[in-house]
Image: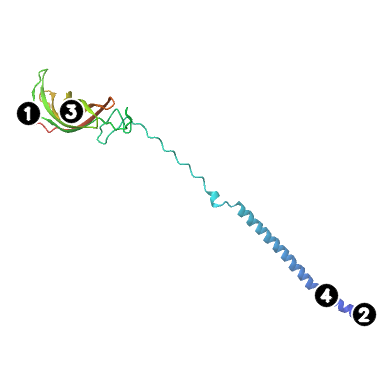
Amino acid sequence: MIRKFAASLFISALTLTPVLAQKETTKEKEVVEKTKQEKVAGKKTTEKSQTLLPSEKMSKKPLPRPTPPAGNNGGMKDNDGMGHGGMKPGDKGNGGAGDIQLGAEVMILNVMKNDANAKPNPNGAGRLVPVKVEWKVKLSPGAKLMELEAMLSTTNTDNSMTKVSKMLSVAANNDTIMLPMPEGVFAKEFVLKINSRCATTGNRTVSSSKMKTGSFPAAK
């Protein structure tokens, strides 16, 4: 009886040994797999912590540049090239009214040469050729025209240059400038500049100038 019981226990032990061994092996595999998963999870966590957010990757925007103050170009200049002196727009006079004072705006209308009516030059050789100049003056409020001066320069057919100036009447709108010219020589191109000087309110003086260039018709 005892032998049969011992034999039965031995057989049971032989039967359970592979099962237990298999369970231990499965448990070891689970432990190894869990360890691997923990390592992988830890690696992903480290990589994630090292990854910068999009807001952290953005560089700081440069600060906007300050707008430079408006410079002083030495006075006002119109599109037609007429420069003005004296007060600038927005300046305040003695009364503090802030009126704009530009003085006189000269518009040169015509410059016409008349070789047929040339006269002998009483001061030397050659002749005096009449050049008729027409202009118009527009005064700013409170301005009074005090002086007009014409300065005429010509380039001639012999490549020489002639210059002459004349004070103009402030009450007129046309005048004739006598251009000295050698015999057989004719003016081809001209540059006419008219300078003006005005008195404005507040005992101010404003000067301006206007220039016109062109060519004379060929002399016949």
Looking at the image, is 19 positioned above or below residue 168? Answer: below
Residue drawn at point x = 89 percent, y = 79 percent: 5
Looking at the image, is 94 positioned above or below residue 58? Answer: above
Q: Earlier in the sequence, mark 2 or mark 1?
A: 2
Dot 2: element: helix
Q: Nearer the viewer, mark 1 or mark 3?
A: 1
Question: Which amino acid, mark 3?
Answer: Thr
The residues bearing labels 1 and 3 have C-alpha atoms spaced at a distance of 19 Å
The residue where tag 1 is placed is: 116
Residue drawn at point x = 78 percent, y = 73 percent: 19
Residue drawn at point x = 9 percent, y = 28 percent: 115
Dot 1: element: helix
The residue where tag 3 is placed is: 155
Q: In the figure, residue 105 lies in which quadrant?
A: top left
- Closest to the observer: 32 or 80? 80
Question: Which amino acid, mark 4?
Answer: Leu
The residue where tag 4 is placed is: 14
Residue 194 in picture, x, y percent from top left: 20, 28
The residues bearing labels 2 and 1 have C-alpha atoms spaced at a distance of 165 Å
The residues bearing labels 4 and 1 have C-alpha atoms spaced at a distance of 148 Å
The residues bearing labels 4 and 3 have C-alpha atoms spaced at a distance of 133 Å
- Closest to the observer: 60 or 83? 83
Q: Earlier in the sequence, mark 4 or mark 2?
A: 2
Residue drawn at point x = 81 percent, y = 76 percent: 15
